[in-house]
Amino acid sequence: MAVRGERVEVSVDARGDPSGIRRGGRVQTVAAVHERWRLEDGWWGQEEQRCYYRVQTSRGAVFDIYHDLVSDEWYLDRVHD
């Protein structure tokens, strides 16, 4: 089974880029998308298709989040210090 991060709710803009993140009942506005990359893999019959984003919020926090294209769910993968 694939390892998943913390589930979050993400709102997107007209282009499909993250514009807001709801985590633990708090909403943070995405001020910038610094990087985008895609992961596609099939391992032991488990298909993975993810779009990753490194985002900075209006409060200055930097997160790596990803959209799981198979389940259509969003996850927080990493919080940068």
Image (cartoon, rainbow, N blue to C red):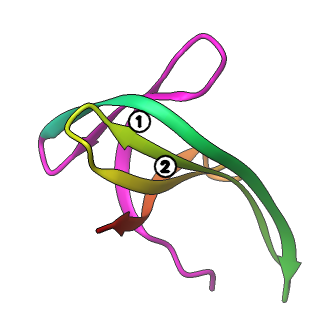
Instruction: Give, as a three-letter code, the residue at label 2.
Output: Trp
Q: Which residue is mark 2?
A: 74
Whether the magenta-drawn stretch holds residue 72 is answered as no
Q: Specify start and end residues of the magenta stretch as a single range.
A: 1-25
Corner quadrant of residue 45: bottom right
- CB within 8 Å, label 1 to label 2: yes
Q: Is residue 18 above or below residue 13?
A: below
Earlier along the polypeptide chain: callout 1 or callout 2?
1
Q: Secondary structure at mark 2?
A: strand
Is disc 2 surrounded by few (<14), some (14 to 19) or many (20+) residues within 10 Å? many
State how far apart marks 1 and 2 are (Cα).
7 Å
Q: Which residue is mark 1?
A: 10
Q: Residue furthest top?
A: 14
Q: Is residue 44 visible?
A: yes
Q: Position of residue 64 (x, y in %)?
A: 48, 58
* Residue 2 horizontal side relative to residue 26, left or right: right
Q: Position of residue 74 (x, y in %)?
A: 49, 49
Image point (71%, 53%), residue name: 70
Can you say which quadrant of the picture contains the N terminus? Answer: bottom right
Q: Secondary structure at mark 1?
A: strand
Q: Is residue 42 above or below residue 19?
A: below
Q: Is residue 31 above or below residue 59?
A: above
Q: Position of residue 30 (x, y in %)?
A: 37, 31
* Residue 53 horizontal side relative to residue 63, left or right: right
Q: Position of residue 58 (x, y in %)?
A: 26, 31
Q: Is residue 53 above or below residue 46?
A: above
Q: Is residue 69 visible?
A: no
Whether the magenta-drawn stretch holds residue 9 is answered as yes
Corner quadrant of residue 17: top right
